[in-house]
């Protein structure tokens, strides 16, 4: 497997575009298109929030009932959530227009939205935006870049990646883009992710691969503890790599799963590191746990702790907050067996062992915690299971951004 440049247009047969529709933002792209030259088998996972945006309901129906999909239309600025019957009708109108200008069935058009909840979409601007996207679509990196920029809200940077690998003598590519900065919490963290691949694979296997992988990638991310109404991950596979279709869990399937995991994990970490107001990516890695579930529970509890996140922002080696978060996680463990370390590119320092602090240098700890990527390593000393979770520090800017988000 080799990481390559590019995003959603890296795989064969995929085109993308971004356009300025002036939905909410007046000075930037705010609509995106992903289009495949050939129909795609499609998989999707969606928010666990009971309050679901109209676009989530639309996409669930397409993924479950349509034999294939061929395009995705995304808008930023307005979430189309809590918009009633009209909101769903606007999904239909968006798909209908896309079907018209792209010459594909309406039932093959997926839609996604991100932004303010409770506001109706300006459907006239959306429809015009679809026309602009169709005219601008391209298969080069510029198309992927424009699409990745267009789906941003409070994100400070676009998030893309792609890999290539070989199956049956054929080069296969997976590319992706995502957005997410706030209202992100495990359970399908507002995050949107779109993965494109030219692999030939059975729809049921694609869905299973995605469903299993999000448990260790997107669902291990938290920025602020809020599970969005719009969370969506979509995977489109058009089969244009020309490999023999994967119809069972064989070696080819495992290679695909490995590559998909790498793409999803990379995108998940990009979101965590770009949390609203964040100055650092904060990783909690649990090793030598009794079970995978124990490891995941503890890791997520630590990166969700507001006090721990604030300590990371202050470059403060306040390990007591980490132990506290572990203790209320619900996982059973022996605190006196645990060892804690802080790690970054600046070094590695142990801070806790045998139930008490070790004799460490506060100055060295502060230096390690001042880097842009910081890891707390939690050694449970009780088994062989492990898990990672990703979040970010909690800064003053998080409150500032969210205090005036609607304005």
Image (spheres, helix red, strand yellow):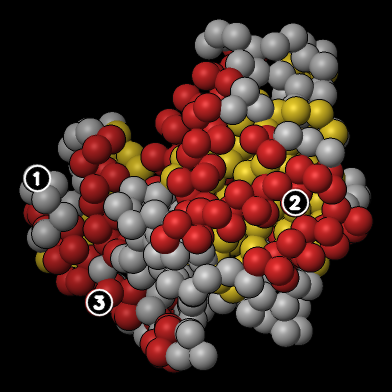
Bin the neighbour count of mark 1 within 10 Å (Cα to Cα): few under 14, some 14-19, many 20 and up. Answer: few
Q: Which mark is residue 332?
A: 1
Residue 307 circle label: 3
Q: CA distance from mark 3 to mark 2?
A: 48 Å
Residue 376 vs residue 357, the one in the foreground:
376
249 versus 319 height, above or below = above
Residue 77 image offset from top left, x and y in percent: 59, 73
User: How many angstroms separate mark 3 from mark 1 (CA)?
Assistant: 21 Å
Which circle's residue, 2 or 1, is located before the other in the chain?
2
Q: Position of residue 301 (x, y in %)?
A: 24, 58
Measuring from the top left, give residue 307's x and y in whole percent: 25, 77
Are the residues tagged 3 and 1 within 8 Å (C-beta)? no
Residue at (13, 47) in percent of width and height: 331
Instruction: Provide residue 106's location: percent of width, then percent of height.
Output: 69, 39
Residue 25 visible (yes or no): yes
* Residue for badge 2: 97
Which label number is shown at residue 258?
Answer: none
Query: Within 10 angstroms of label 2, few (less than 14), some, or many (20 or more) residues?
Result: some
**234 relative to 182 in the view: left or right:** right
């Amino acid at each position: 497997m080799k990481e390559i440049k590019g995003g959603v247009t890296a795989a064969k047969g995929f085109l993308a575009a971004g356009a300025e529709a002036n939905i909410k933002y007046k000075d930037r792209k705010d609509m995106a298109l992903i289009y495949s030259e050939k129909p795609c088998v499609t998989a999707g996972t969606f928010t666990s929030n009971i309050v679901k945006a109209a676009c989530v309901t639309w996409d669930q129906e397409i993924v479950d009932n349509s034999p294939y999909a061929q395009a995705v239309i995304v808008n930023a600025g307005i979430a189309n959530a809590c918009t009633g019957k009209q909101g769903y009708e606007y999904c239909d109108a968006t798909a209908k227009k896309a079907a018209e200008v792209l010459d594909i069935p309406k039932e093959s058009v997926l839609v996604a939205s991100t932004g303010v909840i409770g506001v109706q979409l300006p459907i006239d601007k959306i429809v015009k935006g679809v026309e602009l996207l169709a005219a601008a679509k391209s298969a080069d990196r510029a198309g992927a870049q424009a699409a990745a920029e267009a789906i941003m809200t409070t994100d400070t940077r676009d998030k893309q990646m792609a890999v290539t690998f070989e199956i049956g003598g054929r080069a296969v590519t997976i590319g992706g883009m995502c957005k997410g900065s706030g209202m992100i919490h495990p359970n399908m963290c507002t995050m949107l992710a779109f993965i494109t691949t030219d692999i030939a694979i059975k729809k049921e296997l694609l869905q299973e691969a995605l469903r299993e992988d999000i448990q260790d990638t997107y669902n291990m991310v938290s920025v602020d503890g809020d599970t969005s109404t719009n969370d969506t991950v979509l995977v489109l596979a058009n089969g244009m790599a020309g490999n023999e279709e994967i119809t069972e869990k064989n070696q080819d399937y495992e290679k695909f799963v490995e590559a998909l995991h790498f793409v999803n994990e990379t995108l998940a970490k990009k979101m965590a590191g770009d949390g609203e107001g964040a100055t650092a990516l904060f990783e909690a890695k649990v090793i030598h746990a009794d079970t995978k579930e124990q490891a995941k529970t503890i890791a997520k509890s630590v990166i969700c702790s507001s006090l721990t996140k604030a300590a990371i922002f202050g470059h403060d080696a306040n390990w007591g907050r980490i132990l506290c978060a572990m203790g209320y996680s619900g996982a059973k463990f022996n605190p006196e067996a645990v060892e804690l370390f802080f790690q970054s590119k600046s070094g590695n320092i142990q801070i806790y062992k045998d139930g008490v602090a070790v004799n460490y240098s506060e100055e060295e700890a502060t230096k390690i915690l001042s880097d842009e990527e910081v890891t707390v390593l939690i050694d449970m000393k009780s088994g062989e299971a492990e898990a990672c979770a990703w979040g970010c520090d909690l800064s003053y800017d998080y409150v500032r951004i969210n205090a005036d988000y609607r304005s």
